Image (spheres, grey):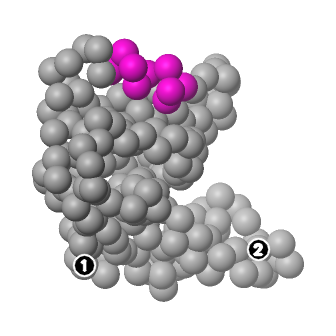
Amino acid sequence: MTTAAAGDRDALAAAVAALLRAAGADLAAKDFADTPDRVARLWCDAFLGGNRLDPAVILGHPVEGEAPTEMVVVRDLPFAGMCPHHLLPYIGRATIAYLPGDKLVGFGRLGELVRCFTARLTLQERAGNDIVDAIMTHLQARGAACIMVGQHACLRIPETRHDAEVVTASFRGEFRDRAELRDRLMPRAS
């Protein structure tokens, strides 16, 4: 992974300063004194920090299941991302489910996987797809699902001001092939 993908803090701070000057802000004013650096730190952590994470490491070292587990579901995993279209944030909660093969992973690892794919410039839909693809690849799961419910600033700020939530669902393996599994999962996810 390149430094640029994880965020060049100095370059971001300079870009924020240029944006503020272009918007007519007086950077010498007390309110803006540290704003470029603060914004750059926030972006590098909250909106680009996922680029520094590796799903293979996050899901590495799984444990073998002690008994067959039909479905693992972890709900209400918080996420925050940055929409690449308007550079406005979105926040929400994710539900991840998987049908284990022989490998199980700690529940906290699933939360870290959500951060890996949302703390970056990405669409909510893509993040969900990336999450289930990583589970299928690194855990050799029989199926994986990710339902994300997000609130997007780009829907709330314009004049239209929609107070809407965006729900995306990504399914792989048996979740994609078996409607009854999706039907069991969906009420738990909302």
- Above or below: residue 186 compared with residue 172: above
Residue 90, position in %: x, y? 55, 44
Q: Is the magenta stretch mostly helix, strand or loop?
A: helix
In this view, the residue farthest toward the right is 30
Q: Nearer the viewer, mark 1 or mark 2?
A: 1
Q: In this view, does 103 lie to the left or right of 151?
A: left
- In the rendered view, tell whether residue 158 sits above or below residue 103: above
Please name the residue shown 31% across and 81% down the image. Answer: 3
Q: Does the magenta stretch include residue 189?
A: yes
Q: For the residue carrying disc 2, how many other residues have a C-alpha within 10 Å: few (<14), some (14-19), or many (20+)? A: some
- Given residues 117 and 160, the one toward you in this image is 117
Is 10 part of what is drawn in magenta? no
CB contact under 8 Å: marks 1 and 2: no
Start and end of the magenta stretch? 182-190
Amino acid type at image mark 2: Phe
Question: Which image quarter is the C terminus in?
Answer: top right
**Seen in the image, is 36 located left or right of residue 138?**
right
Please give the name of the residue rendered at 29% of the width and 42% of the height, measured from the top-left corner. Answer: 69
Q: Position of residue 34 (x, y in %)?
A: 72, 81
> Where 176 falls versus 183 (above or below)?
below
Residue located at (34% from left, 46% from top): 127
Query: SS at mark 1?
Result: loop
Look at the picture and state if 57 lies above or below 146: below
Q: Residue 32: x and y, percent?
A: 76, 74
Which residue carries the number 1 mark? 2
Q: Earlier in the sequence, mark 1 or mark 2?
A: 1
Tag 2 secondary structure:
helix
Q: Residue 91: horizontal and vertical position, in percent?
A: 57, 45
Q: Name the residue under label 2.
A: 32
Image quarter for residue 163? top right
Residue shown at 62%/80% (left/top)? 37
The label number, if any, that marks residue 17 in the structure image:
none
